[in-house]
Amino acid sequence: MIRYFISDLHLSDKRPDLIRAFVQMTKDLIARQEEAELYILGDFYEAWIGDDFQADWNTQIENALLELTHSGIKLYFLHGNRDFLIGQEWLSRVNASFMHEQTLLSINGNAVLLTHGDEYCLGDTEYQAFRTTVRSKTWQEHVLAMPLEQRIALAAQLRNDSKSMATAKSMDIMDVTESAVKTSLEHHHCKTVIHGHTHRPETHQADNYLRCVLGDWDNAVWLASIEGNIFRQYRTSVENFLQHGLIGLKEIHRETLTR
């Protein structure tokens, strides 16, 4: 069994190249004919305004996911800070299983915690206040009751506000608070966490804990995997991936899972 991990693709109609790359990735994974699972750890879309939203550019994404699951590859999804309105209708359309924030997996005898990672960015108090609001059931029900056009406008406003706030903040403020990660791992009796969100792909070893940060899809395609007890992360340019697919990926990080 091999498990694959991706996050922060931020797919939208503004980036048809990333959509093509993702569709190519699903086809290549199917062609490998291996027992596999794919975990999407949030921000799969640049923005999601409700499962009732349909667009041609997204139809090809959902079709690719459906072909993936029909091939026997299991698909798992958890919310990020851009796609927290994805609901059961979307999950059913692509045969995906939903994971709650901070889902613990047992992988080959190793406990591995999966999450998007934004809950660890405690230094960004402005963002944490926003996060509390948009993750509330009341706020989400209110937004989903809006007409579609109004939700589209709201999503555009939230994206613009997010970019403006990020420009004014240092990267350290927007990165995780290590003590929050450690507390989370101790709570789950676990020593390995995989997350995205920060757009700072790396592997970190500290205090006998392993933190694996997934890469974001902007100028590059990233794919991570766990096979046996080894975590690997691969990268290549979007252009190279579109030409060569999975065989064009280069290994960037390798770590043995921490027990």
Image: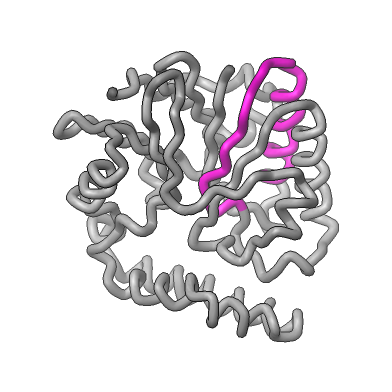
Residue 212 covered by magenta stretch: no
Residue drawn where x is 71% and y is 52% of the image: 91
Residue drawn where x is 75% and y is 40% of the image: 65
Q: Quadrant of residue 95?
A: top right
Residues in magenta, as a range: 18-44
Residue 26 covered by magenta stretch: yes
* Relative vertical location of residue 138 with respect to residue 32 in this rendering, above or below: below
Q: Quadrant of residue 123?
A: bottom left
Q: How is the image coloured?
A: one colour
* Relative vertical location of residue 128 with respect to residue 231 in this rendering, above or below: below
* Relative vertical location of residue 127 with respect to residue 28 in this rendering, above or below: below
Q: 115 left or right of 75? A: left
Q: Position of residue 196 (x, y in %)?
A: 43, 46
For the image shown, how many numbered marks are present on the structure?
A: 0
If the image is split into quadrants, where does the N terminus sit?
top right
Q: In the current view of this chain or complex, which residue is farthest to the left?
A: 207
Q: 1 left or right of 104? A: right
Q: Position of residue 66 (x, y in %)?
A: 80, 40
Q: Position of residue 234 (x, y in %)?
A: 49, 25
Residue drawn where x is 56% and y is 63% of the image: 84
Q: Position of residue 174 (x, y in %)?
A: 30, 59
Residue drawn where x is 65% and y is 65% of the image: 48
Name the residue nearer the viewer: 177 or 259.
259
Q: Quadrant of residue 105?
A: top left
If the image is split into quadrants, where does the C terminus sit?
top left
Name the residue nearer the viewer: 151 or 88.
88
